Amino acid sequence: MSGHSKWSTIKRKKGAADAKRSKIFSKLAKEITIAAKEGGSGDPEMNPRLRTAIVNAKGVNMPKDVIQRAINKATSGTENYMEVTFEGTGPGGVAVFVECLTDNNQRTVSSVRSIFRKRGGELGKNGSLSYLFDRKGIFNIITENLKMDIEELELELIDAGMEDMEEEDGRLIVTTAMEDFGSMQKKLEELGIEVENAELQRIPNVRKELDVETSQKALKLIEALEDDDDVQNVYHDLEMTEDLEKALQEE
């Protein structure tokens, strides 16, 4: 199982245990709003980014009326979010890349800087660490929803730009290059395959292996960033070792 697959599995289990559904809804609602605004349309059929955001919202059972309110905020002009990113290092030199959606950049900068400082990290300059990550399209498909053989599906998806496919925890995780994200999304729609989640992620080129204690300190920083209301995604290059996975499962 690849590094990002292991982290996805742990995050799903922790997310269910921690009952952070309202925070997840809030982050997805922001993405829906900015997708509708930046895409120039509140119609998902005419706006691929909005269509993806709605798919992800449905994947966590967000109610239809909440989705529609998020779209309405964009079309009514009542929300004005901007996308900002931050790069820094955490305990043990772990590289951390943070994506935010905010309506107050000064507040977000202050909050993110404070979290890095309090959790033993250091905020760096934009561009200082981005070269450590590649942007990839990641599609999560629940295998029980498939209406075709996995080998047959694999052949279909290779033609759409699939780089990798992994099966774990009742899901298929399909990886594409960033430029093939749209063609893969279109191919899955043509095949009638329901996607639980689809997004562009920043995947580290190399992962950093640390002892469990230092890894847990780095994770405290990552979790604190993820808990911030303005933060949408946090990416890092920490390796999920067997010892760390065991320690997380025991929490």
Image (tube, grey):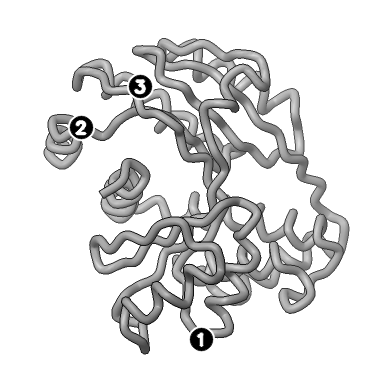
Q: Is residue 26 visible?
A: no
Give the CA distance from mark 1 to mark 2. 37 Å
Q: Amino acid at mark 2?
A: Thr
Which residue in the rendered view is the most extreme toward the bottom?
147
Looking at marks 3 and 1 on the same chain, the residue that comes earlier in the sequence is marked by 1
Q: Is residue 215 above or below residue 92?
A: below
Tell me the residue at 20%/18% (across/down). Answer: 211
Q: Residues within 10 Å of mark 3 (few under 14, many from 20)?
A: many
Nearest to the eye among marks 3 and 1: give it.
Answer: 1
- The residue indicated by pointer 2 is 241
Q: Amino acid at mark 3?
A: Ala
- Where is residue 131 drawn, in percent x and y? 58, 26
Looking at marks 2 and 3 on the same chain, the residue that comes earlier in the sequence is marked by 3
Which quadrant would residue 169 be assigned to in this image? Answer: bottom left
Along the viewing direction, whichever of 156 and 251 lies nearer the viewer:
156
| Secondary element at tag 2 | loop
- Where is residue 184 drawn, in percent x and y? 57, 68
Contact (CB < 8 A) between labels 3 and 1? Answer: no
Give the CA distance from mark 3 to mark 1. 40 Å
- The residue indicated by pointer 3 is 218
| Secondary element at tag 3 | helix
Q: Amino acid at mark 1?
A: Gly
Q: Is residue 158 above or below residue 17?
A: below
Tell me the residue at 16%/42% (across/down). Answer: 249
Q: Could you tell whether 213 is left or right of 72 in the image?
A: left
- The residue indicated by pointer 1 is 192
Along the viewing direction, whichever of 207 and 238 lies nearer the viewer:
207
Q: Residues within 10 Å of mark 2 (few under 14, many from 20)?
A: some
- Where is residue 212 drawn, in percent x and y? 19, 22
